[in-house]
Amino acid sequence: MLFHVKMTVILPADMDPAVATKLKADEKELAQRLQREGQWRHLWRIAGHYANYSVFDVPSVEALHDTLMLLPLFPYMEIEIDGLCRHPSSIHTDDR
Ligand SMILES: O=C(O)C[C@H]1C=CC(=O)O1
């Protein structure tokens, strides 16, 4: 199942910079692993914002929820999710 996910990161203004740096490094490591494994299909920065648009390919809504909760920055994110399905006018036949 494909999901379009918008993640907006809001770090507390008084967060220790060293803690923020570690969280971002851990997040990057997991994000890159999930991309290599194929669950995190797309990851795009939203220009001008500490936010991204992502596409996840996971077996279920529960799997998406569990994956997002693993993200080190999850406690500092606002997340919006839309389920995706094929558009009847799409010319791409190689996707689900
Ligand atoms: O930077 C972000 O958008 C938040 C998060 C998503 C992937 C990652 O490495 O950090």
Image (tube, grey):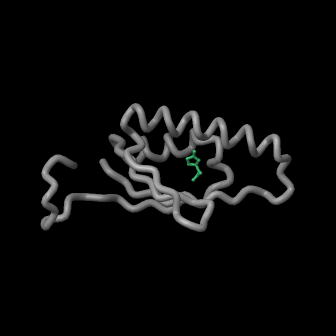
Return the x and y of residue 55 as percentages of the image width and height: 39, 52
Residue at 79%, 41% in the rendered image: 19
Q: Is residue 17 above or below residue 80?
A: above
Residue found at the far front of this picture: 47
In the image, 76: left or right of 39?
right
How many numbered callouts? Answer: 0
In the image, 48: left or right of 93?
right
Name which quarter of the figure residue 84 lies in: bottom left
Return the x and y of residue 1 as percentages of the image width and height: 30, 48
Residue at 54%, 65% in the rendered image: 47
Q: Is residue 49 above or below residue 21?
A: below
Residue at 50%, 36% in the rendered image: 32
Residue at 55%, 35% in the rendered image: 30
Name which quarter of the figure residue 64 lies in: top left
Return the x and y of residue 17 as percentages of the image width and height: 82, 47
In the image, 30: left or right of 91?
right
Return the x and y of residue 87 as percentages of the image width and height: 19, 64
In the image, 79: left or right of 43?
right
